[in-house]
Image (tube, rainbow, N blue to C red):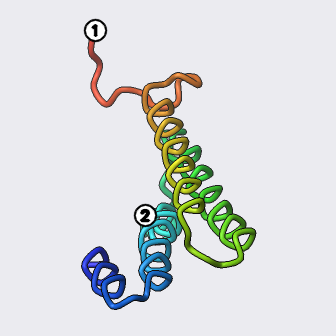
């Protein structure tokens, strides 16, 4: 739904609104809702067994900070240079997220079921 609303406002000439919608609805929702089950669980706190969640939350938060700083430094304008910078940042984020999941930085993501593979 958010993608469709972003597409509609972008076609109307409001590119800034489309980008704001993408940032607000995706990055902030994932970042803020990641810890919600631990806060509202009624049988006590949920212990986090996957350290990878902490690292990915830190990565998402750094992405939010980067977006705000990069947008400010670019004069709050959307241009080709800014788009390329955001694509490079996204690529870096995806590489680190994949490396976390593959346990390259240590044993952060234990397997769900024991397996000899």
Image quadrant where one finds the C terminus: top left
Sequence-wise, the earlier of marks 2 and 1 is 2
Residue that label 1 marks: 116
Judged from this view, the residue extending furthest toward the front is 80
* Label 1 element class: loop
Left or right: 71, with 18 as reference point = right
Image quadrant where one finds the N terminus: bottom left
Judged from this view, the residue extending furthest toward the top is 116
- The crowd level at tag 2 (other Cα within 10 Å; few <14, some 14-19, many 20+) is few
Residue at 57% in and 22% down: 106
What label does residue 21 carry, if any? none
What is the x, y in percent for residue 105?
A: 58, 25
Where 114 falls versus 28 (above or below)?
above
Residue at 39% in and 88% down: 13
Where 76 falls versus 58 (above or below)?
below
Residue that label 2 marks: 43
Name the quadrant containing residue 6.
bottom left
What is the x, y in percent for residue 33?
A: 46, 68
What is the x, y in percent for residue 48?
A: 50, 46
Q: Which of 65 and 69 is in front in this view?
A: 69
């Amino acid at each position: 739904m958010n993608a469709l609303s972003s597409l509609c406002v972008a076609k109307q000439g409001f590119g800034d609104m489309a980008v704001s919608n993408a940032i607000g609805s995706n990055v902030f929702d994932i970042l803020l809702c990641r810890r919600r089950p631990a806060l509202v669980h009624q049988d006590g706190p949920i212990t986090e067994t996957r350290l990878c969640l902490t690292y990915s939350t830190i990565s998402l938060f750094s992405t939010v900070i980067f977006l705000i700083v990069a947008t400010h430094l670019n004069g709050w304008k959307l241009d080709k240079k800014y788009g390329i910078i955001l694509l490079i940042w996204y690529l870096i984020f995806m590489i680190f997220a994949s490396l976390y999941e593959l346990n390259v930085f240590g044993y952060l993501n234990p397997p769900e079921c024991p397996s000899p593979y």
